[in-house]
Amino acid sequence: MKIALVCPYDFSRPGGVKSHIVSLSKHLTIIGHQVKIIAPNINANAVEEKNVYFFGKNRSVNIGGTKIDVNIALGDEKKQLKAFLNGEVFDIIHYHTIWNPLLPFQVLKHSKAKQIATFHDTPKSQFVGDWIMPTVARGIFTFLDQIISVSNSQSGYISRFSKRNIHIIPNGIDLDEIHQIAPQESKRDDDFFQMFFMGRLEPRKGVMHALRAFHQLKERYPKMKLIIAGDGDGRAEVEQYITDYTLTDVEMVGFVSEAEKYRLLKESDIYLAPALYGESFGIVLLESMAVGTPIAGYANSGYKNVITNDMMKGFAEPGDLDAFAKCIENLIPSSKREELSKHGLEEVKKYNWAEVSMEVNEVYLK
């Protein structure tokens, strides 16, 4: 079949939804499908993937503590999008986070293919989650042939707006590719306890919680290091905090490549996942588990879809900074980390993309 995967985000930047789409595209192609990706026309020259087609312009709007990418194709680009869809004659249009306006709606309007959507996010704020999304969701659902959710918690959210059947298919992870990219062994030559945070620098992702927990522990454990990857509107606050408290051994590396991401994950003693809310699954948890790096974080509703009972010792209730810092401290002994590392390496196997992509394919055939 000819399949289009629609991404509402800047495809030049790393992220969970982008990673999902790239891996799904790869494995659908292995199955035998022809796959093309539609994405906003942002930093197109920086995108390495060859099967991506760019339309529309991007604007970022801050709603409920999270930046929402608003993309729309106007004028000649709108005509090009319509011509592209008419020329390709896709059998399946598969949207990801379809309610991020407006490019997915434009594709929906101009395509006569079977319409399928995967929902990745769970809005938190009352304004977005309780007012905007119900209205948008009910309108969207009338046009969709099949609905996929990445987790039970996310499914519980969208089922409030529709009684239709929802297929729950988790995020996948490409273990073979990760093992090729990630270094086999850490090449660090220091004896610091290294922690790694990666994500948008915004309140929801909890970067300040990672920084404050580090601050709490640094005095007792002077050989402790924190690496922060990512960027966002909260960068100035992070930098100001580091300056105000003269925090040494905090390194901000900005956006990182896939290879650099896995190197940092592999070389770190623990990964920090302090997202407060709005997570529907937590693909970064799988990435960390795949390279054997233990995790400390907040047990938000999305992460609970991945966290096992054995992993809970590394997780605190969202927002409880002291408990989060204690979780980190509990993982300083290498024996505790080795135990969680082995558990994660085994647990992550159930999310292999080779199997997950077949579940998606079954939905296409319905």
Image (cartoon, rainbow, N blue to C red):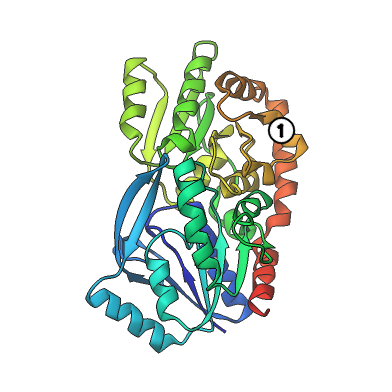
Q: Is residue 18 left or right of residue 147?
A: left
Residue, far right: 309
Mark 1 lies on residue: 312
| Residue farthest to the top, as pictured | 220
Q: Position of residue 361 (x, y in %)?
A: 65, 74
Examine the rendering and report whether any part of residue 146 can be seen.
yes
Residue 301 lies, with reference to residue 363, above or below; the image says: above
Q: Nearer the viewer, residue 259 or 67?
A: 67
Q: Tell me residue 41's x, y (percent).
A: 31, 65
Which residue is depicted at the point 67% across and 61% down? 169
In what quadrant of the picture does the C terminus appear? bottom right
Residue 73 in the image: above or below residue 322: below
The residue closer to the viewer here, 329 or 40, is 40
Mark 1 secondary-structure assignment: helix
Q: Position of residue 14 (x, y in %)?
A: 44, 52
Specify whether residue 51 is in view: no
Residue that appears at 44% across and 74% down: 108
- Please tell me which residue is depicted at 55% across the width and 22% down the height of the picture: 321
Vertical placement of residue 345 versus 10, above or below: above
Side of 342 where 62 appears, left or right: left
Q: Position of residue 339 (x, y in %)?
A: 74, 33
How many numbered marks does the figure carry?
Answer: 1
**Neighbour class for label 1 at 10 Å: few (<14), some, many (≥20)?**
some
